Amino acid sequence: MNNEILPSGPDARPDARPVMDWDRFSEVTDGNEETMRELIELFYRQTTQQLCQIEAALKIGKADEVRRVAHSCAGASATLGMVRLAPVLRTLEKQAAEGNLGEAPQLFQNAGAEFKQIQLFLATRPGLSSIQAP
């Protein structure tokens, strides 16, 4: 079975890595489908909220808020094996910590595209396909 979805469309970045490290996620959840569902639902809710917070902070130029939320979101993403989303958020966090928001809108757009790719990938997994992001 192919465990990866590669990016496509106008927001795509060329990245040959799988969108998610399924082995990492399975390890975190001990392969338990109920735990997987609970974590994915929580991840979708939190990431949706955090991306909204980052967007709002970007609109008013609050670099420290961008840094704080990107840090939190990157940590959860890395823990669950979101191998393309976490580095984008880490870059956004680092630049915001330096007070540099020049590339932040593009990084934010890339993070949103990666989040959509995660949702597409998980929609192909048995037992997880019915989970919808808020």
Image: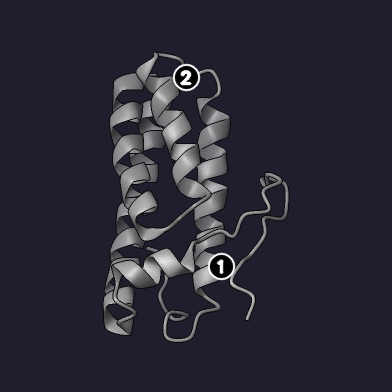
Residue at the far top in the pictured view: 99
Residue that mark 2 sits on? 101
Residue 117, compared with residue 54, is above or below; it is below
Q: Residue at x 42, y 35 (%)?
A: 90
Judge left or right: residue 105 versus residue 52. right
How many angstroms separate mark 1 from mark 2 (CA)? 29 Å
Residue at left 54%, top 58%?
116
- Which of the 4 image quarters holds residue 103? top right
Residue at 29% from the left image edge and 76% from the top image edge: 30
Q: Position of residue 27 (x, y in %)?
A: 34, 70
Side of 70 relative to 84 (left or right): left
Amino acid type at image mark 2: Leu
Q: Badge 2 local density, few (<14 within 10 Å), some, or many (20+)?
A: many
Question: Where is residue 42 shown, x and y percent of the image?
Answer: 28, 63
Q: Which mark is residue 28?
A: none
5 displayed left or right of 88: right
Secondary element type, mark 1: helix
Image coordinates for residue 106, horizontal then vertical, percent: 58, 32
User: Who is closer to the viewer here, 20 or 105?
Assistant: 20
Report whether residue 31 is seen: yes
Q: Is residue 21 left or right of residue 60?
A: right
Give me the residue at 62% from left, 54% from top.
17
Tell me which corner region of the image, top left, top right, bottom left or bottom right, holds residue 79.
Answer: bottom left
- Mark 1 — residue? 120
Comes first in the chain, label 1 or label 2: 2
Above or below residue 58? Residue 69 is below
